[in-house]
Amino acid sequence: MSRKVKIVEVGIRDGLQNENKIFSVSDRWKMINGLTASGVQHIEVGAFVSPRWVPQMHGSLSLGKKAVSKNKRASKKINYSALVPNERGMQDAIKSGLKEISIFGACTESFSKKNINCSMNESFERFKKIVILAKKNKIKVRGYLSMAFGCAYEGRVSQAKVVQLVEKMLDLGVYEVSLGDTIGVATPKQVRGLLDKLNSKVAFTKLAMHFHDTRGTALANVLASLDQGIYAFDSSVGGLGGCPYAGGASSGNLATEDLVYMLHGMGFKTGINLTKLIATYGWIQKRLDHSLPSHVGRAGEPKTIGI
């Protein structure tokens, strides 16, 4: 069993896109600096989308350039990335200088049309063009597949269908596919069942899991994934946000603090300083008009000797 777990911080993109309050580029840069100071090594800094559709992501090009510039000066490099929905967004990604981007697909037709305004087949045609440009510019591509465990519009999702889509996305040339429980309905039994089906088809080193804690099962699902051999997870500082196109049931991203606390307690290594991460959570919460759902952020680290 590997003792190192990769955590991809998605709060600045996946988290803030669901917030009513729009953070300035300056505040988002402060968030990024707080996360890197905490030891977070993989950070999604934004999305190259039209601010008309997602105003929270305005200035992502500026943030990408700042991140690239910071990496050039740093002795320890951070893996910065951004979401790219189409060729237009890919052009901005190239301008930013970022060396990794993400593409975002769905496991159901209804959510694909709601989220990216096209069918699943059309989305993969878009992805092909993005990947070609990425390879030409030596940019790594990560893939997301949302609604992998249940859909807000179609209900149950076929596990065989999810397996096919994972293979299809890997065939495009992505280095990793993140499977999303977008509406927070997954249970450990369901997670184990899907991973059992994927086991003979896909190397688990090419998989990550993206659990929402909407119904309180995210950490249990992480544990089930660890037991199956998955060592890469997405999470959001403070439990920020979720997807604004998931029928109102998407709140409750897994809080990075909760994930780190559990992993460290189990003897896994993340490279993240929990004390500094909690301080970053506190800074963010002060700038919002509501509290954040992170359990560890609220409770803090235990003071009792021996815990």
Image (cartoon, grey):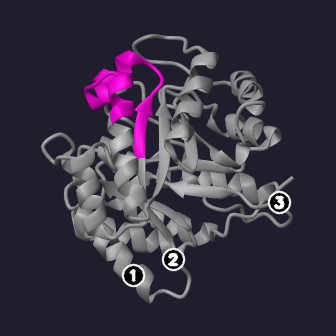
How far, Cα to Cα, is label 2 from label 1? 12 Å
* Residue type of the residue flagged with mark 1: Lys
Left or right of 22 in this view: 105: right
Which residue has dot 1 on it? 70
Pick the residue in front: 181 or 78. 78
The quadrant in which residue 34 appears is bottom left
Mark drawn on residue 279: none
How far, Cα to Cα, is label 3 from label 1? 31 Å
Which residues, given as a range, are shown in magenta? 103-125
Left or right of 282 in this view: 95: left
Q: How many marks?
A: 3
Q: Residue at x 47, y 62 (%)?
A: 43
Secondary structure beneath label 1: helix
In the rendered image, residue 274 lying in the magenta stretch gets the answer no
Pick the residue in front: 227 or 303. 227
* Residue type of the residue flagged with mark 3: Gly
Which residue has dot 3 on it? 267
Q: Quadrant of the C terminus?
A: bottom right
Secondary structure beneath label 3: loop
Secondary structure beneath label 2: helix
